[in-house]
Amino acid sequence: MKADLIVGLQWGDEGKGKIVDFLAKEYDFVCRFGGGHNAGHTIVVDNKKYALHLVPSGILNEKAINIVGNGVVLSPKDFIKELEQFDNVKGRIYISDKAHLLLPYHAKIDQAKERLKGDKAIGTTGKGIGPAYGDKITRVGHRVGELLHPKKLTKDIMEYFKIQKPIFDALQIEAPNEKELLEELTFYKEKLQDYITDTTLLVWEALESSKKVLVEGAQGTMLDIDHGTYPYVTSSTTISAGACSGLGIAPQKIGKVIGIAKAYCTRVGNGPFPSEDFGEDGEYLRKMGHEFGTTTGRPRRCGWFDAVAMRHAIKLNGVDRVALMKLDVLDGLKRVKVCVGYEFEGKTIDYVPYTLEGVKPIYQEFQGWDGSKGVREFEKLPKEAKEYIQNLEELIGAKIGIISTSPNREDTIFRT
Ligand code: GDP
Ligand code: IMO
Ligand code: MG
């Protein structure tokens, strides 16, 4: 059996959580491969809202076993808090012993560095993601499996602070108190030891015994450390290739790739966003789409669907089908714009250059519509909305197989 994959195609917050939750009923395993609690996945079931950050979005389906893969950076404190909203998840969620630990000092480093950058700040979530991945890559990080030996881990972390003292002094970050650190890590061990395991083996076994595996991406393609709008990106591989290293799945074991995209576009934090709308329409999208971050509450920057960036994302991820989310948010607009090309360094281009800094959008306009909210059959969508979708398919060269018309699980259209 091959693992199917869900990835974000824009700058995150595309609605991955809703689709993973919706599809989870057909899967035995739901596995997260990257990111940390910078992610915020909102799921609405029976009018109840759940905000997930580290827990995979399969948790609301009782059958699925959820895996936090080795590619994730895990804050034990935040994970423990997040688990409290669910009853009895033992045996339904496992954390890789190879996932890296994100500890409170990582958040302090993140925030201190952002302050020092001033107007060059990335606009991170301030959760410590960059510093935790930085420690992993520079080989001074600690892994979840080490939590099982808190005394040794405490000693190692104290040593880490000693070695890096000049850096911490410059950032005005104090070393933890050894006794308090030991207490904290012992508490994490007690709370998490039943969940920590070798998840690579679990995933291999699942695939070999023909279990259905769904892999959940976090963030979005344009925030990918290599292929996004560097340096205004997150610190992990967010594209489908990350699923292989972040879970231990070989490339030929990846099955269908479903790419998630909003019917328009948003971004949180700083960095270029060619199709951003600074006028009334951008404001309308923010209001109608409730575009405020799930993790930080920051207003999301809003703009139009960017078909150029989407084609790039579809290629990078090997997308088979696109899920077009939040179509209903465009209800009530007279005209809907789509970015179909870029002006870059005096030329018109139809691809994503190495930087989007200074890129100007070229738009095509479409007739607006009203009344797509809550529609569950393609044929029942307003005529102009159907035309918009068909035009997008042509512009991006991929089939839009899923359309979402409200936050609710049921308000989802499937097309064959
Ligand atoms: P994720 O990070 O990709 O999982 O997305 P988020 O959960 O951060 O943001 C998507 C937001 O849109 C959430 O609040 C969802 O409840 C909401 N949402 C998802 N699909 C739809 C939709 O089709 N219509 C509307 N109006 N809201 C949606
Ligand atoms: P989900 O999974 C939207 C953005 C931050 C910032 C940049 C770097 O909900 O789609 P970081 O804290 O990761 O170092 O911040 O990345 N960012 C997200 N934006 N959705 C997310 O996740 C994001 N995770 C990180 O706003 O611009
Ligand atoms: Mg989100």
Image (cartoon, grey):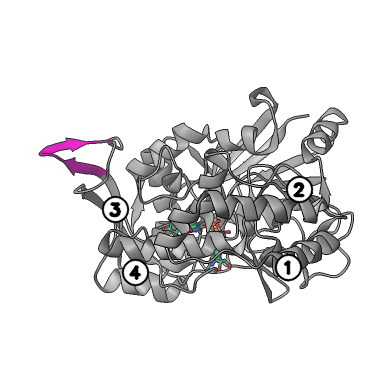
Q: Quadrant holding ligand 1?
A: bottom right
| Residue count near mark 3 (Cα–Cα under 10 Å), binned few <14, some 14–19, many ≥20 | some
Counting from the top left corner in percent of width and height, residue 309 is at 36, 43
Disc 1 to disc 3, C-alpha distance:
45 Å
Going from N to C along the chain, the mark reached first, 1 or 4, is: 1
Instruction: Give above or below for 245 relative to 223.
Output: above
Going from N to C along the chain, the mark reached first, 3 or 4, is: 3
Going from N to C along the chain, the mark reached first, 3 or 2, is: 2
- The mark closer to the camera, 3 or 2, is 2
Disc 3 to disc 4, C-alpha distance:
25 Å
Tell me the residue that label 4 is attached to.
Answer: 333
Tell me the residue that label 2 is attached to.
Answer: 146
The stretch drawn in magenta includes residue 349 = yes
Helix, strand or loop: magenta stretch: strand
Tell me the residue that label 1 is attached to.
Answer: 179
| Amino acid type, label 4 | Leu
The local secondary structure at tag 4 comes to: loop
Relative placement, left or right, of 96 versus 8 is right
